[in-house]
Amino acid sequence: MTTTIAYLGPEGTYTQLAAIAYSLDLEHRIGQPVELLALPSIPKAMQATADGLTAFTIVPVENSTEGGVTTTLDTLWQLQQLNIHHAMVMPIRHGLLSQATTLATVSAVYSHPQALSQCQQWLEHNLPQADLVATRSTTEALGHLTDDTSIAAISSEWAAQLYNLPILAHNINDNSDNCTKFWVLASDQATLNQAGQYTSLAFSLPVNGPGALLQPLEVLARYNINLSRIESRPTKRSLGEYLFFVDLETNAHSKIGQQALKQLRACTETLVNFGTYSRVGVEPSLALAKAKSKSTQALP
């Protein structure tokens, strides 16, 4: 039996690097083959798992420089049957890929909006003349680079190797400690992590008035639960109405976690528990080395 993992494609995205790392670990744990399925957008990847077409989906959720990936959060709220099984934190090192010989001849730079933002200062300083064009992923624009020497793309150095493209500039992200957190999502409740250290919730409020948000925050303070992240998103019902995504440093299955959740339900309109999970660091170069070793061993 083969387990399939959906991820934001095409091949060469940072999400695929995270998916490779997770698939190798999963194969070791379950003793069965794992396949990766590239899909063109985050919602489509998540929908594939919600529909039962794949066992897992790996999606980016937060970057240390640019904050939350809003598409992931909005889709997770819409597909409330998905649960978080694991979190993975991976360093992100951007390169500028282009057939151009100098930076001065680059007139346009393509990449995912997050990548463009993570390199904003570098781009303003080194490519002030270039137009910035958003794409659905960091590899979507790579196919055009061979046809136009005035175009560049921000992507991974691994993508450059994969598509045989030259790197005009290395490590162009503004923050050297730039990293992204990925969530491993599934709809199978039976395989949920019961022993994780983190829990992610989302909730809407019953009224849009003074002190409405303070009440759930007071619940967390009362139980001495650290709130490591909070982010608001529009409910899409009315201007000024928001729902809140929060990451808690607690296990929702513990006695304290259960008591806190009970009180949170009493002061929120809708409360969704996306799961308790553990978080691990991922070094992309090690994941690639393992993946290459595995593919070499599979050759006849």
Image (cartoon, rainbow, N blue to C red):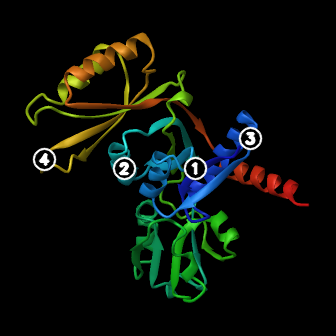
Count residues near mark 4 (Cα–Cα under 10 Å), then give few for <14, some for 14-19, many for 20+. few
Q: Residue 164: give x, y in percent of width and height.
A: 69, 75
Per the model, the C-alpha gap separating discs 3 and 2 is 30 Å
Give the secondary structure at mark 2. helix
- Mark 2: which amino acid? Thr
Q: Is residue 296 above or below residue 57?
A: below
Per the model, the C-alpha gap separating discs 3 and 4 is 48 Å
* Mark 4 vs mark 2: in front: 2
Precedes in sequence: disc 1 or disc 4: 1
Q: Which mark is residue 91?
A: 1
Q: Which mark is residue 227?
A: none
Q: Which mark is residue 240?
A: 4
Q: Residue 114: give x, y in percent of width and height.
A: 42, 60
Precedes in sequence: disc 4 or disc 2: 2
**Residue at 55% across / 43% down in the picture?**
89
- Residue furthest to the top in view is 255
Closer to us: 280 or 102? 280
Question: Is residue 100 in view from this perspective?
Answer: yes
Closer to us: 51 or 13? 51
Labelled pair 3, 2 in contact (Cβ < 8 Å):
no
Per the model, the C-alpha gap separating discs 1 and 2 is 24 Å
Per the model, the C-alpha gap separating discs 1 and 3 is 28 Å
**Residue at 53% across / 64% down in the picture?**
172
The quarter in which the C terminus is drawn is bottom right
Q: Which mark is residue 32?
A: 3
- Mark 4: which amino acid? Gly
Closer to us: 49 or 112? 49
**Residue at 44% across / 59% down in the picture?**
118
* Mark 1 vs mark 3: in front: 3
Q: Which mark is residue 75?
A: 2
Per the model, the C-alpha gap separating discs 1 and 4 is 35 Å
* Mark 3 vs mark 4: in front: 3
